[in-house]
């Protein structure tokens, strides 16, 4: 039983991880390697679909519990479930073209299916506005917290100011109409910024690659809910 | 400097009001600031200018409604450019949270101005597919294996354009409009392994990181945020008279119009930052 | 229906913006609706764009030729056994395959697509082929990348030459973060411009035009 619960998942992780790695290094003429990689890639497209929806079960469970127990804020839980069920139902019915629900995008004559209407006039504005709120909080935070306390903070502040001015039309022509600030901003992005980003990228990539290796060889097992010595 | 101390303890809702007014006024009363072109944007424009009716470009909508004010104008402008030149276009979406809706809407907006463009012959909309890197790698072998049908359910073997596009080898350029990491995957996975030229239109938040890919040649160009979108629109307007008429339309949201508000708000926020630091330094001086 | 849709969208937009004044039931309602509708959207799109064309239709139209698609179906459905107390360890098998594949891809992607090309374009011979500015830029790039990497090397104490290099690395990082902040301001403000444009142009002016 321990083999099925512990060793088997670790072996499957190693196998699934090695297939794309081996295929990368093998010549395309090595048919068995390419076939394995192809099959796995096609399967992953479908498996990813199921994986993406995994969180839905969790959300439904917690909100149903909230409603059953009439916990604080339970009407909002009901709103969440209503929104989810309404959208999912018209989406699934539209996907399989049941009754009046023929598709989930635009209709051939340019009209909107119910799902498309929900996507355009409920989903999109809600998501867009949630993120638009950030502009206000960022302005408030910049006013209250962005201070030149030391040399490093001053460098950060000056770089931010240069970019903010250099990327707007007014700032580009601030020096008597000459584009020096714009050119300096472009240089700042192309060279010092690129250097910093590259250093971070290389460091993070090496870390990610070593973590991937640890997962494949079975040292890192937390994603399976296991401790190192289990 | 008592007024500075009072300013520092201002209720943040007044700051919110300033920001809202500063953004709304240029929308109501457009200013019309000039837009200048930067090399990363020019490179994408020049690449598309070098292509023609025999060439195929793929657009990947890798963003959702959360960043549509930045990514929509760049997607629309690049799509208009390709269709104006008769370039064949394949549209896909890889972003699960609204990518395909953004693709639907962009196509709907742009195709209204190109009634001669035919679905299945001049462009094809393949829709969204989950799987991220698996999907992107599989497209390097076979588009049909990933997208058995187009967005509307037509089998790929029945679509004339897809008869001559098997994988990335048949595309001259891939343009990703991205909000998150998917744009990076086009550069560090697809360009690295399949060598197809990649251009990315990204949000301003992620733009600084893409300069490293630009510098190393993994991307041919970059549209960074609303500024990048406004530059591309300017290039289109300057060289395509039909585009000028389109972008002058009243009520159409364009990046160039958006840059007016951007200019005002950047100035407002810079003033806030300067005032905050003056108060901070004055306070430090007193002590 | 279009005008009704714009009014619904604008109402929901204002509900979210009301949070700027203070937390209130309108905001909470819109927030919960957002969470629910997002999940429903996911479900609808996955069903329409992946499950139906890549799984259901191939199995329904030619089962003999596509029977192997039962394998990803089984693996995918098995992921959900984690919610069944008695058999929740079955889900480990599916998770193992899913995570294993993506870490395998990721490992090659990071090394081949990030580390190698980025290092290759950093370690270039200094030459005057691009003029004095080109030479200076190459030097800045090389020194910047090296010192940033030294900063992130925590196995050595940051003193002496290492400390000095690390300090320069921090300056480069501050330049990069400052540029990132400037762009972040641009990005966030753009989102607000989009929403206010919608309210002013599509809602208010659009309604006046349809009534007029």
Image (tube, rainbow, N blue to C red):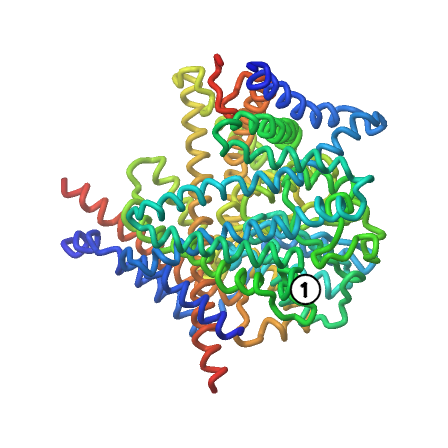
Circle 1: element type: helix
- Residue C121, x across and y down, in percent: 64, 32
- Residue C35, x across and y down, in percent: 44, 51
| Foreground pick, B282 / C106 | C106
| Foreground pick, C36 / C174 | C36
Query: Label 1, on which residue?
Result: B80
Q: Going by the image, does A61 lie left or right of B201?
A: left
Residue at the image position 48 percent from the left and 55 percent from the top: C37
Residue A59 to residue C117: above or below: below
Q: Most extreme residue toward the bottom, as rendered?
A: C212
Quarter of the view holding residue B24 = bottom left
For mark 1, name the chain.
Answer: B
Quarter of the view holding residue B25 = bottom left
- Residue C105, x across and y down, in percent: 65, 30
Q: Going by the image, does C140 lie left or right of B263?
A: right
- Residue B178, x across and y down, in percent: 58, 49
Quarter of the view holding residue B120 = bottom right
Residue at the image position 81 percent from the left and 46 percent from the top: B166
Residue C144 to residue B164: above or below: above
Residue C190 to residue A39: above or below: below
Residue at the image position 60 percent from the left and 49 percent from the top: B62
Residue A165 to residue B130: above or below: below
| Foreground pick, C48 / B168 | C48
Can residue C111 be spotted in the picture?
no
Can residue C206 be spotted in the picture?
yes
- Circle 1 packing at 10 Å, graded few (<14), some (14-19), many (20+), is many
Residue at the image position 53 percent from the left and 33 percent from the top: C140
Q: Going by the image, does B273 lie left or right of C4?
A: left
């Amino acid at each position: 039983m321990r083999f099925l619960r512990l060793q088997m998942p670790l072996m499957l992780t190693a196998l699934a991880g090695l297939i794309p790695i081996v295929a990368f290094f093998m010549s395309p003429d090595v048919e068995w390697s390419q076939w394995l990689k192809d099959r796995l890639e096609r399967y992953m497209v479908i498996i990813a679909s199921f994986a993406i929806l995994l969180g839905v079960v969790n959300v439904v469970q917690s909100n149903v519990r909230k409603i059953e127990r009439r916990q604080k804020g339970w009407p909002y839980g009901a709103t969440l479930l209503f929104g989810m069920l309404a959208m999912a139902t018209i989406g699934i019915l539209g996907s399989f073209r049941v009754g009046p629900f023929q598709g989930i995008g635009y209709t051939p004559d340019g009209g909107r299916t119910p799902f498309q209407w929900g996507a355009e006039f409920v989903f999109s504005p809600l998501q867009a506005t949630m993120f638009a709120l950030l502009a206000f909080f960022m302005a408030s935070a910049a006013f209250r917290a962005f201070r030149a306390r030391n040399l490093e903070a001053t460098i950060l502040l000056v770089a931010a100011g240069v970019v903010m001015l250099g990327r707007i039309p007014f700032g580009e022509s601030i020096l008597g109409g000459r584009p020096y600030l714009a050119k300096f901003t472009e240089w700042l992005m192309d060279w010092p910024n690129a250097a910093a980003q590259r250093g971070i990228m290389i460091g993070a990539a090496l870390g990610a690659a070593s973590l991937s290796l640890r997962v494949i060889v079975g040292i890192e097992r937390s994603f399976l809910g296991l401790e190192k010595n289990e | 400097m008592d007024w500075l101390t009072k300013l520092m303890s201002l209720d943040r809702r007044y700051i919110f009001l300033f920001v809202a007014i500063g953004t709304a006024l240029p929308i109501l009363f457009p200013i019309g600031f000039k837009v200048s072109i930067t090399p990363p944007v020019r490179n994408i424009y020049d690449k598309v200018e070098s292509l023609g009716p025999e060439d195929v470009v793929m657009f990947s909508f890798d963003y959702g409604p959360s960043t549509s004010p930045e990514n929509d104008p760049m997607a629309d402008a690049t799509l208009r450019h390709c269709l104006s030149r008769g370039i064949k276009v394949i549209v896909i979406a890889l972003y699960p949270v609204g990518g395909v809706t953004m693709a639907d809407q962009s196509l709907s907006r742009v195709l209204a101005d190109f009634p001669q463009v035919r679905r299945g012959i001049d462009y094809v909309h393949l829709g969204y597919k989950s799987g991220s890197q698996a999907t992107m790698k599989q497209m390097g072998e076979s588009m049909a294996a990933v997208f058995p049908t187009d967005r509307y359910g037509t089998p790929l073997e029945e679509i004339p354009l897809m008869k001559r596009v098997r994988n990335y080898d048949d595309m001259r350029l891939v343009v990703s409009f991205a909000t998150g990491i998917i744009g990076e995957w086009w550069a560090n996975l697809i360009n690295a392994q399949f060598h197809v030229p990649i251009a990315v239109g990204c949000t301003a938040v992620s733009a600084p990181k893409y300069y490293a890919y630009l510098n190393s040649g993994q991307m041919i160009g970059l549209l960074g945020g609303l500024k990048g979108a406004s530059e591309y629109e300017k290039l289109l307007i300057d060289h395509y008279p039909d585009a000028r008429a389109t972008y002058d339309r009243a009520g159409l949201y364009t990046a160039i119009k958006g840059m007016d508000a951007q200019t005002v708000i950047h100035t407002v926020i810079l003033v806030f930052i300067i005032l905050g630091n003056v108060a901070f330094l004055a306070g430090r001086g007193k002590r | 229906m279009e005008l009704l849709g714009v009014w619904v969208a604008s109402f929901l937009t204002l509900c979210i913006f009301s949070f700027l004044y203070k937390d209130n039931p309108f905001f909470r309602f819109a927030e919960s609706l957002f969470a629910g509708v997002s999940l429903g959207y996911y479900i609808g799109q996955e069903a329409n764009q992946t499950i139906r064309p890549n799984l259901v239709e191939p199995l329904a139209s030619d089962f003999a030729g596509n029977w192997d698609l039962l394998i990803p179906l089984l693996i995918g459905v098995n992921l959900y056994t984690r919610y069944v107390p008695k058999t929740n360890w079955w889900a480990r098998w599916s998770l193992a395959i899913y995570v294993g594949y993506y870490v395998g891809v990721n490992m090659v992607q990071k090394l081949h697509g990030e580390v190698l090309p980025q290092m290759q374009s950093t370690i270039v011979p200094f030459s005057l082929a691009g003029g004095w500015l080109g030479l200076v830029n190459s030097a800045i790039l090389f020194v910047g990348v090296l010192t940033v990497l030294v900063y992130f090397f925590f196995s050595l104490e940051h003193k002496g030459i290492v400390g000095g290099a690390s300090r320069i690395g921090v300056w480069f990082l501050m330049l990069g973060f400052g540029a990132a902040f400037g762009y972040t301001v641009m990005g966030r403000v753009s989102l607000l411009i989009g929403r206010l444009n919608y309210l002013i142009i599509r809602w208010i002016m659009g309604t006046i035009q349809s009534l007029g």
